[in-house]
Amino acid sequence: MRTRLFRTLTSRSALIVMNTVFTYLTLIILWGVVMELRRSQPNWHELDQIIEGMAVISVAFGVALESREDIMVILGLYPRFACPTEHRIDQVCKDYGIGFLLFGLFMEIPNVAVRLPEYILPTEGIEVPTLAISVFFTICVLLGSVLATWRLIKLPPLRETGDH
């Protein structure tokens, strides 16, 4: 029963659902940023919190995806259920997981720079360029999540490959 639960939670279908939720969350966050910027007086503190939240989520999701193969070993699913299709799923997770992790970090760097004291880094008036950088990396995460989901969908099913 435990094995079945772990296999379900780490399955390609579960990963597709998780990526879809992640994509939706990223869209909502981008929409929130756009709506805040449309105000006559944007709340820079709120925008900072939104981007910081997205960065943390991207890093965490990226680490989890990138570590799928190790998680499968820890849960006792590998080597028992290891097969070529599972390894292809692991590779997709590793490729996009590393991307989400890096984009999340790059999203956060400009945010942190704006919070540095003026004597370390003159930050007056750089809110818009730093936000633009963070939004660019958020869009990269959005595109990556769509592509990751698409790649997972396009993998051949287990029964067609002759795998377990």
Image (cartoon, rainbow, N blue to C red):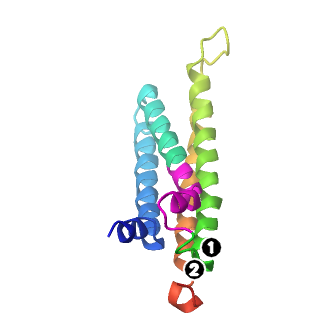
- In this picture, is 153 found above or below 45? below
Place of residue 57 in the rendered image (x, y in percent of width and height, measured from the top left): 47, 45
Residue 62 forms part of the magenta stretch: yes
The crowd level at tag 1 (other Cα within 10 Å; few <14, some 14-19, many 20+) is some
- In this picture, is 108 found above or below 140? above
| Left or right, residue 32 beside residue 124 | left
Q: Can you identify the residue that label 2 sits on?
A: 155
Q: For marks 2 and 1, give the CA distance.
A: 8 Å
Q: Amino acid at mark 1?
A: Arg
Q: Nearer the viewer, residue 8 or 52?
A: 8
| Left or right, residue 80 beside residue 46 | right
Residue 129 in which image quadrant = top right
The reply to whether discs 2 and 1 touch (Cβ–Cβ < 8 Å) is yes
Place of residue 67 in the rendered image (x, y in percent of width and height, measured from the top left): 57, 55
The crowd level at tag 2 (other Cα within 10 Å; few <14, some 14-19, many 20+) is some
Q: Nearer the viewer, residue 124 or 65?
A: 65
**Residue, far top:** 119
Place of residue 37 in the rendered image (x, y in percent of width and height, measured from the top left): 45, 37
Place of residue 126 in the rendered image (x, y in percent of width and height, measured from the top left): 61, 25
Which of the two discs, 2 and 1, labels the residue nearer the N terminus? 1
Q: Amino acid at mark 2?
A: Leu
User: How many numbered marks, from 0 up?
Assistant: 2
Q: Which mark is residue 88?
A: 1
Q: Quadrant of the N terminus?
A: bottom left
Q: Which residues are magenta?
A: 61-78
The dominant secondary structure in magenta is helix
